[in-house]
Amino acid sequence: MRTLAREPKATQQTTSSTLTKPSRAFLGQNRDVQSIMNCWEAVLLSAYRAGAINWNWIHNLYVSTPPADWITAMSRGSLHNYAIPGPNLRIPQRGDLVFFDGLAHVALATGKGSDVFTFWPPPNTPFTAGGTLDRVKVFTIEELVTWWEAHMPPAPTVEFAAPAW
């Protein structure tokens, strides 16, 4: 389920996926099941694996929280706008969630300037219908916005906040 700030383009509706079999069962999955996830699920999986959230937290987000409230549920404190071009008085700190047009894309700040960990095919991997074999990458917010504006105009609104965990 995705919540987008505006009508999604066909390329935005494609989810990133990892099409390798897991080495062990994860959260009750069978080892023969292929894993498919999107950008914010990659962020949640990272928090889960780091011990910052547990399975109940993730389950409650999906079951008890309306998608329109996910950004509030996933973040702590105020959302801060990230202007391109800057200057920006605030930049994302390590571990902050970075939202591109709400939940259209979610990345995780590295703490090194505007670099983010991103699980999204662009800008260096083309989308594939039904899911794109991809990996977590590091790009700047500006690189992602530049690609987005060129291929899915207009440029997204970028906001960031500390995670709820």
Image (spheres, grey):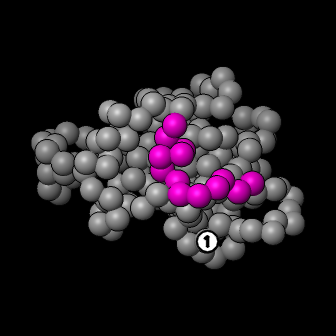
Residue at 37% across, 41% down: 61
Q: Quadrant of residue 139?
A: bottom right
In screen coordinates, is 2 left or right of 160? left
Kindly identify which residue carries mark 1: 93
Residue placed most toward the observer, 35 or 53 = 53
State whether residue 1 is above or below residue 36. above
Q: Which residues are magenta?
A: 69-81
Residue at 38% across, 60% down: 46
Residue at 66% across, 53% down: 79
The answer to whether residue 36 shows anywhere in this view is no
Q: Quadrant of residue 141?
A: bottom right
What x and y, as percent, mark residue 138? 57, 65
Looking at the rendered structure, the kind of residue marked 1 is Gln
What x and y, as percent, mark residue 68? 54, 32
Residue at 49% across, 40% down: 70
What x and y, as percent, mark residue 109? 58, 65
Label 1 neighbourhood size at 10 Å, few (<14), some (14-19), many (20+)?
many
What x and y, as percent, mark residue 149? 78, 42
State whether residue 161 is above or below residue 35. below
In screen coordinates, is 38 left or right of 108? left
Identify the image quadrant of the C terminus.
bottom left
